Amino acid sequence: MELKEKFTVHGYDIALNSPCFVTGKISANAELCLKAYVTDIEAGERIVQMFNGHARLDKWPYNAASAFPQVEVAVSVKNQDALCELQRLTSKNENVISREIIEQARQAPANQPSPLTD
C-alpha cells in the first residue's frame, strides 16, 4: 500500500541552503520553495522521507500564525517547473501527496504553466 499524506500548499517563499528536490544538490543561492501544511510532525517526517530527505520539516509554526507544522520543498531555478507541477498534482489529488506524485513532478518538462505567473 502506497503511503499518502495530507499536504496543503499555502504559498511560495525563498529558501537558503535547501536541497533541490529534483537533483538533491544544495546551492549557496536563494532558491524558490513551496510551503505546505501537514497534519502533524510525524506526518511531516514521513513526507520528508518521501522526498528522500530533499525537503525540510519546519516544526516551529505552532503559534498564532498556524496550528500546523509545514514542509518546505525547494528547487533550483532551472527546476521551478517541477515545483509548480508538484503543486498542481497535489491540488488535483485533493491536497494529498505520495511518492508517485513526487516522481511525476520530478519528471515535469520545462515550460509548464506556473501558478507564480498566472
Image: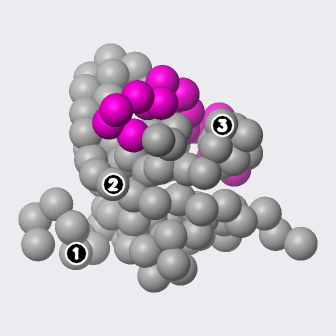
Q: SS class of the residue under badge 2?
A: strand
Tag count:
3
The residue depicted at 54 percent of the width and 28 percent of the height is 59
Q: Residues within 10 Å of mark 2 (few under 14, many from 20)?
A: few
Query: Which amino acid type is shown beneath numbered disc 1?
Result: Pro
Spatial CA distance of label 1 from label 3 is 32 Å
Q: Residue 58 at x, y = what percent?
A: 50, 30
Kind of residue at badge 3: Ile
> Which x, y percent locates residue 57?
55, 33
Magenta-span inclusion, residue 23: no
Q: Nearer the viewer, mark 1 or mark 3?
A: 3
Q: Which label sits on residue 113?
A: 1
User: Which residue is farthest bottom?
Assistant: 92
> Given the current orientation, which residue lies at the most extreme left position?
117
Identify which residue, 38 or 83, lies in the foreground: 38
How many angstroms separate mark 2 from mark 1 (CA)? 18 Å
Q: As drawn, is 20 to the left or to the right of 49?
A: left
Q: Quadrant of the N terminus?
A: bottom right
Whichever of callouts 1 and 3 sits on the residue coming sooner in the sequence is 3
Identify the mark nearer the N-term, 3 or 2.
Answer: 2
Residue 30, horizontal then vertical, whole percent: 25, 27
| Above or below, comparing residue 50 to residue 16 in the picture | below
Mark 2 residue type: His
Q: Which residue is mark 3?
A: 41
Question: Pointers 3 and 2 in contact (CB under 8 A)?
Answer: no
Query: What residue would you read off at disc 2?
Result: 10
Residue lying at the far right in this picture: please name it. Answer: 1
Measuring from the top left, give residue 70's x and y in whole percent: 48, 41
